[in-house]
Image: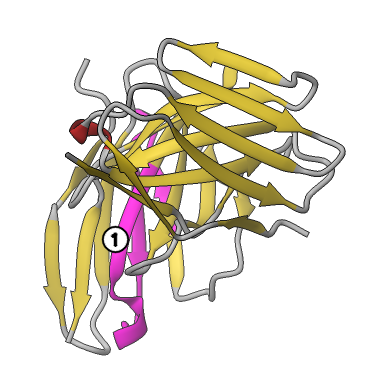
Amino acid sequence: GEDVEQSLFLSVREGDSSVINCTYTDSSSTYLYWYKQEPGAGLQLLTYIFSNMDMKQDQRLTVLLNKKDKHLSLRIADTQTGDSAIYFCAEGSNDYKLSFGAGTTVTVRA
Amino acid sequence: DAGVTQSPTHLIKTRGQQVTLRCSPKSGHDTVSWYQQALGQGPQFIFQYYEEEERQRGNFPDRFSGHQFPNYSSELNVNALLLGDSALYLCASSSTSDEVEAFFGQGTRLTVV
Protein backbone atom coordinates (compact mmCIF):
# COMPACT_ATOMS: atom_id res chain seq x y z
CA GLY A 1 0.00 0.00 0.00
CA GLU A 2 1.03 3.61 -0.46
CA ASP A 3 -1.06 5.37 2.18
CA VAL A 4 0.58 8.28 3.95
CA GLU A 5 -1.21 9.81 6.93
CA GLN A 6 -0.62 13.04 8.81
CA SER A 7 -2.38 14.98 11.52
CA LEU A 8 -4.27 17.86 9.90
CA PHE A 9 -3.51 20.82 12.13
CA LEU A 10 -0.80 22.09 14.48
CA SER A 11 -0.75 25.38 16.38
CA VAL A 12 2.52 26.50 17.94
CA ARG A 13 3.77 29.57 19.75
CA GLU A 14 6.50 31.61 18.07
CA GLY A 15 9.92 30.51 19.35
CA ASP A 16 8.74 27.05 20.40
CA SER A 17 9.55 23.82 18.56
CA SER A 18 7.04 22.29 16.15
CA VAL A 19 6.78 18.55 15.62
CA ILE A 20 4.84 17.21 12.66
CA ASN A 21 4.17 13.49 12.49
CA CYS A 22 3.55 11.15 9.58
CA THR A 23 2.96 7.43 9.13
CA TYR A 24 3.29 5.45 5.95
CA THR A 25 2.46 1.92 4.92
CA ASP A 26 4.73 1.07 2.00
CA SER A 27 7.60 -0.98 3.40
CA SER A 28 9.48 -0.64 0.11
CA SER A 29 9.81 3.14 0.52
CA THR A 30 13.34 4.20 -0.25
CA TYR A 31 13.15 7.91 0.49
CA LEU A 32 10.91 9.98 2.73
CA TYR A 33 10.39 13.67 2.16
CA TRP A 34 9.06 16.81 3.74
CA TYR A 35 7.65 19.53 1.51
CA LYS A 36 6.31 22.97 2.46
CA GLN A 37 3.47 24.74 0.66
CA GLU A 38 2.62 28.36 1.28
CA PRO A 39 -0.77 29.80 0.20
CA GLY A 40 -1.17 29.89 -3.56
CA ALA A 41 2.27 28.40 -4.15
CA GLY A 42 3.81 25.15 -5.31
CA LEU A 43 5.75 22.72 -3.15
CA GLN A 44 9.14 23.54 -1.70
CA LEU A 45 11.41 20.60 -0.87
CA LEU A 46 12.57 21.04 2.73
CA THR A 47 14.49 17.88 3.37
CA TYR A 48 14.51 14.15 2.79
CA ILE A 49 15.90 11.06 4.46
CA PHE A 50 16.94 7.68 3.13
CA SER A 51 15.09 4.76 4.60
CA ASN A 52 18.31 3.29 5.99
CA MET A 53 18.87 6.35 8.18
CA ASP A 54 17.13 7.17 11.44
CA MET A 55 17.92 10.86 11.76
CA LYS A 56 18.91 13.82 9.65
CA GLN A 57 19.53 17.38 10.81
CA ASP A 58 19.59 20.42 8.57
CA GLN A 59 19.81 23.77 10.37
CA ARG A 60 16.49 24.23 12.22
CA LEU A 61 15.04 21.03 10.79
CA THR A 62 15.40 17.55 12.31
CA VAL A 63 13.91 14.49 10.67
CA LEU A 64 13.43 11.31 12.66
CA LEU A 65 12.55 7.99 11.03
CA ASN A 66 11.35 4.89 12.82
CA LYS A 67 11.34 2.34 10.03
CA LYS A 68 9.98 -0.45 12.20
CA ASP A 69 6.85 1.60 13.03
CA LYS A 70 6.85 3.38 9.63
CA HIS A 71 6.77 6.70 11.46
CA LEU A 72 8.40 9.91 10.27
CA SER A 73 8.56 13.23 12.07
CA LEU A 74 9.78 16.72 11.29
CA ARG A 75 10.90 18.99 14.10
CA ILE A 76 11.27 22.71 13.44
CA ALA A 77 13.30 24.46 16.11
CA ASP A 78 12.59 28.08 17.07
CA THR A 79 9.44 28.26 14.96
CA GLN A 80 8.91 31.62 13.23
CA THR A 81 5.83 33.24 11.66
CA GLY A 82 7.33 32.48 8.24
CA ASP A 83 7.03 28.79 9.07
CA SER A 84 3.23 29.03 8.89
CA ALA A 85 2.32 26.81 5.94
CA ILE A 86 1.08 23.36 4.98
CA TYR A 87 3.67 20.61 5.41
CA PHE A 88 3.47 17.44 3.35
CA CYS A 89 5.09 14.16 4.10
CA ALA A 90 5.81 12.01 1.03
CA GLU A 91 7.31 8.64 0.34
CA GLY A 92 9.10 7.48 -2.77
CA SER A 93 10.57 4.24 -3.94
CA ASN A 94 12.21 2.94 -7.07
CA ASP A 95 9.06 3.39 -9.15
CA TYR A 96 9.84 7.10 -9.41
CA LYS A 97 6.55 8.51 -8.11
CA LEU A 98 5.87 10.28 -4.82
CA SER A 99 2.91 9.48 -2.59
CA PHE A 100 1.82 12.37 -0.40
CA GLY A 101 -0.14 12.73 2.79
CA ALA A 102 -3.01 15.22 3.04
CA GLY A 103 -0.78 17.81 4.68
CA THR A 104 -0.49 19.37 8.14
CA THR A 105 -1.46 23.03 8.45
CA VAL A 106 0.93 24.72 10.86
CA THR A 107 -0.16 27.99 12.40
CA VAL A 108 2.40 30.02 14.33
CA ARG A 109 0.90 32.38 16.91
CA ALA A 110 2.70 35.31 18.49
CA ASP B 1 18.24 29.17 -13.09
CA ALA B 2 14.50 29.76 -13.44
CA GLY B 3 13.61 26.50 -11.72
CA VAL B 4 10.47 24.67 -12.84
CA THR B 5 8.09 26.95 -14.73
CA GLN B 6 4.47 26.25 -15.54
CA SER B 7 1.96 28.04 -17.72
CA PRO B 8 -0.61 29.35 -17.49
CA THR B 9 -0.90 30.15 -13.79
CA HIS B 10 -4.70 30.20 -13.83
CA LEU B 11 -7.25 28.85 -16.26
CA ILE B 12 -11.03 28.65 -16.40
CA LYS B 13 -12.68 26.11 -18.70
CA THR B 14 -16.18 24.82 -19.31
CA ARG B 15 -17.26 21.23 -18.78
CA GLY B 16 -16.57 19.10 -21.83
CA GLN B 17 -13.75 21.28 -23.09
CA GLN B 18 -10.12 20.27 -23.47
CA VAL B 19 -7.12 21.89 -21.78
CA THR B 20 -3.36 21.86 -22.26
CA LEU B 21 -0.97 22.77 -19.45
CA ARG B 22 2.73 23.33 -19.97
CA CYS B 23 5.87 22.74 -17.93
CA SER B 24 9.54 23.57 -18.42
CA PRO B 25 11.81 21.58 -16.12
CA LYS B 26 14.67 22.91 -14.09
CA SER B 27 17.89 23.28 -16.07
CA GLY B 28 19.74 19.97 -16.22
CA HIS B 29 16.65 17.88 -15.44
CA ASP B 30 15.36 15.32 -17.91
CA THR B 31 12.35 13.83 -16.12
CA VAL B 32 8.95 15.48 -15.65
CA SER B 33 6.13 14.30 -13.41
CA TRP B 34 2.61 15.69 -13.17
CA TYR B 35 0.46 15.79 -10.05
CA GLN B 36 -3.11 16.85 -9.33
CA GLN B 37 -3.80 18.59 -6.03
CA ALA B 38 -7.48 18.99 -5.19
CA LEU B 39 -8.43 21.60 -2.60
CA GLY B 40 -7.47 20.50 0.90
CA GLN B 41 -5.66 17.37 -0.26
CA GLY B 42 -2.14 16.26 -1.00
CA PRO B 43 -0.86 15.96 -4.57
CA GLN B 44 -1.81 12.80 -6.46
CA PHE B 45 0.58 11.38 -9.05
CA ILE B 46 -0.77 11.46 -12.62
CA PHE B 47 2.19 10.29 -14.72
CA GLN B 48 5.88 10.73 -15.42
CA TYR B 49 7.76 11.31 -18.66
CA TYR B 50 11.33 10.42 -19.47
CA GLU B 51 12.98 10.25 -22.89
CA GLU B 52 9.71 11.44 -24.42
CA GLU B 53 7.82 8.41 -23.15
CA GLU B 54 5.39 7.83 -20.31
CA ARG B 55 7.37 5.82 -17.76
CA GLN B 56 4.89 5.49 -14.92
CA ARG B 57 1.20 6.29 -14.51
CA GLY B 58 -1.04 6.81 -11.53
CA ASN B 59 -4.71 6.00 -11.19
CA PHE B 60 -6.09 8.55 -13.66
CA PRO B 61 -8.39 7.93 -16.64
CA ASP B 62 -7.26 8.06 -20.26
CA ARG B 63 -8.73 11.55 -20.52
CA PHE B 64 -5.44 12.60 -19.00
CA SER B 65 -2.57 12.39 -21.46
CA GLY B 66 0.81 13.94 -21.82
CA HIS B 67 3.78 14.56 -23.96
CA GLN B 68 7.45 15.30 -23.50
CA PHE B 69 9.47 17.19 -26.08
CA PRO B 70 13.14 16.76 -27.03
CA ASN B 71 14.04 19.78 -24.89
CA TYR B 72 12.48 17.91 -21.89
CA SER B 73 9.55 20.28 -21.55
CA SER B 74 6.17 18.64 -21.14
CA GLU B 75 2.46 19.12 -21.68
CA LEU B 76 -0.49 17.72 -19.78
CA ASN B 77 -3.71 17.39 -21.75
CA VAL B 78 -7.11 16.75 -20.23
CA ASN B 79 -10.07 15.98 -22.49
CA ALA B 80 -13.80 16.13 -21.77
CA LEU B 81 -13.31 18.18 -18.63
CA LEU B 82 -15.42 17.43 -15.58
CA LEU B 83 -16.16 19.69 -12.64
CA GLY B 84 -14.08 17.31 -10.53
CA ASP B 85 -11.00 18.10 -12.61
CA SER B 86 -10.83 21.49 -10.91
CA ALA B 87 -7.53 21.46 -9.03
CA LEU B 88 -4.00 22.75 -8.84
CA TYR B 89 -1.86 20.89 -11.36
CA LEU B 90 1.76 20.63 -10.34
CA CYS B 91 4.73 19.74 -12.44
CA ALA B 92 7.87 18.30 -10.86
CA SER B 93 11.23 17.82 -12.49
CA SER B 94 14.12 15.59 -11.55
CA SER B 95 17.26 14.15 -13.03
CA THR B 96 17.96 10.51 -13.73
CA SER B 97 21.46 11.14 -12.39
CA ASP B 98 19.93 12.15 -9.05
CA GLU B 99 16.39 10.89 -8.77
CA VAL B 100 16.12 11.68 -5.08
CA GLU B 101 15.21 15.34 -5.37
CA ALA B 102 12.09 16.44 -7.23
CA PHE B 103 11.49 20.16 -7.62
CA PHE B 104 8.01 21.51 -8.13
CA GLY B 105 6.70 24.43 -10.12
CA GLN B 106 4.16 26.92 -8.83
CA GLY B 107 1.32 25.04 -10.46
CA THR B 108 -1.59 25.83 -12.75
CA ARG B 109 -4.91 26.47 -11.04
CA LEU B 110 -7.61 24.95 -13.28
CA THR B 111 -11.24 25.79 -12.61
CA VAL B 112 -13.93 23.90 -14.54
CA VAL B 113 -17.35 25.56 -14.59
Mark 1 lies on a secondary structure that is strand
Label 1 marks a residue whose chain is B
Residue drawn at the location 18% of the way across and 52% of the way down: A40
Q: Is residue A4 visible?
A: yes
Q: Is residue A81 above or below residue B45?
A: above
In this rendered view, identify the residue nearer to me: A88 or B70.
A88
Q: Position of residue B41 (x, y in %)?
A: 42, 65
| Label 1 Cα crowd, 10 Å radius (few <14 / some 14-19 / many 20+) | many
**Residue B76 in magenta stretch:** yes
Residue at the extreme right:
A68
Tell me the quarter of the picture where residue A59 sits: top left
Q: Position of residue B100 (x, y in %)?
A: 59, 24
Residue drawn at the location 52% of the way across and 57% of the way down: A7
Q: Position of residue B59 (x, y in %)?
A: 61, 68
Residue drawn at the location 61% of the way across and 47% of the way down: A22
* B51 with respect to A51 (left or right): left
Q: Is residue A61 above or below residue B85?
A: above
Q: Is residue A56 above or below residue B3?
A: above
Q: Position of residue A64 (x, y in %)?
A: 65, 27
**If the image is split into quadrants, where does the C terminus of chain A sit?**
top left
Residue drawn at the location 43% of the way across and 52% of the way down: A104
**Which residue range is magenta in the image?**
B66-91
* B87 with respect to A94 (left or right): left
Residue tagged 1:
B88
**If the image is split into quadrants, where does the N terminus of chain A sit?**
bottom right
* B105 with respect to B95 (left or right): left
Q: Is residue A96 visible?
A: no
In this rendered view, identify the residue nearer to me: A77 or A99.
A77
Tell me the quarter of the picture where residue A13 sits: top left
Q: Amino acid at mark 1?
A: Leu
In this rendered view, identify the residue nearer to me: A19 or B57.
A19
